Image (cartoon, rainbow, N blue to C red):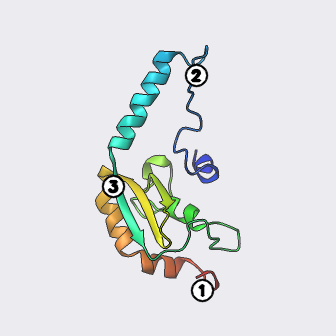
Amino acid sequence: MLRAIGDYPYTGLYQFVPMVKSTDWPISKIHQLAHLHSSIIDDLKVIYIHHIQDIHNVIDDAGHSLLQGFYGMTVTGQPPEDTQDRLIHSIHNTSRPGVTVALVQSSKYEAALGQFTNLQNILSNSIAKHYH
């Protein structure tokens, strides 16, 4: 699951959302999934991050992006064991240069604010100088 999130960061936990009825996806199942998505979205809070580079910029020699670094952030500060440990639901560039938006579950909002308050130090210590 964590690999899928890294490869397809904007689809969240669900890689496929059907829009047409089929044998595997009857209308009732599509309807349940739509309700699940609505409940997930209703629980998200927005955090705007200012003065930051494009989240697709490479930040290490292995070719990882800033986006992948953000998805590595966890509530505990330890590497994620599963998706429940992830701090950020999703993160996106905006149309304004230098402004990024993070979507965070309500229950993780305070932890996210704490880590984003210290973001400059986290990025400075985690990313080699020649990638700044």
Q: Which of marks 3 and 2 is in front?
A: 2
Q: Which of marks 1 and 2 is in front?
A: 2
Question: Label 1 to label 2, Cα distance in Å?
Answer: 49 Å
Number of numbered tags placed on the structure image: 3
Q: Determine which residue is flagged by label 1.
A: 129
Q: Is residue 15 above or below residue 120?
A: above
Q: What residue is at 40 percent from the left and 60 percent from the top?
A: 76
Q: Is residue 14 above or below residue 94?
A: above
Image location of residue 62, percent across then percent down = 70, 69
Which of marks 1 and 3 precedes in the sequence?
A: 3
Q: Determine which residue is flagged by label 2.
A: 20
The amino acid sitting under disc 1 is Lys
**The N terminus: image quadrant:** top right
User: In the rendered view, does 31 fall on the left or right side of 68?
Assistant: left
Circles 3 and 2 in contact, beta carbons < 8 Å: no
The amino acid sitting under disc 3 is Lys
Which of marks 2 and 1 precedes in the sequence?
A: 2
Between 119 and 31, the one lying in front of the other is: 31
The amino acid sitting under disc 2 is Val
Q: Determine which residue is flagged by label 3.
A: 108
Image location of residue 84, percent across then percent down = 43, 47
Please tell me how crowded label 1 is: few (under 14), some (14-19), or many (20+) other residues with Cα within 10 Å: few
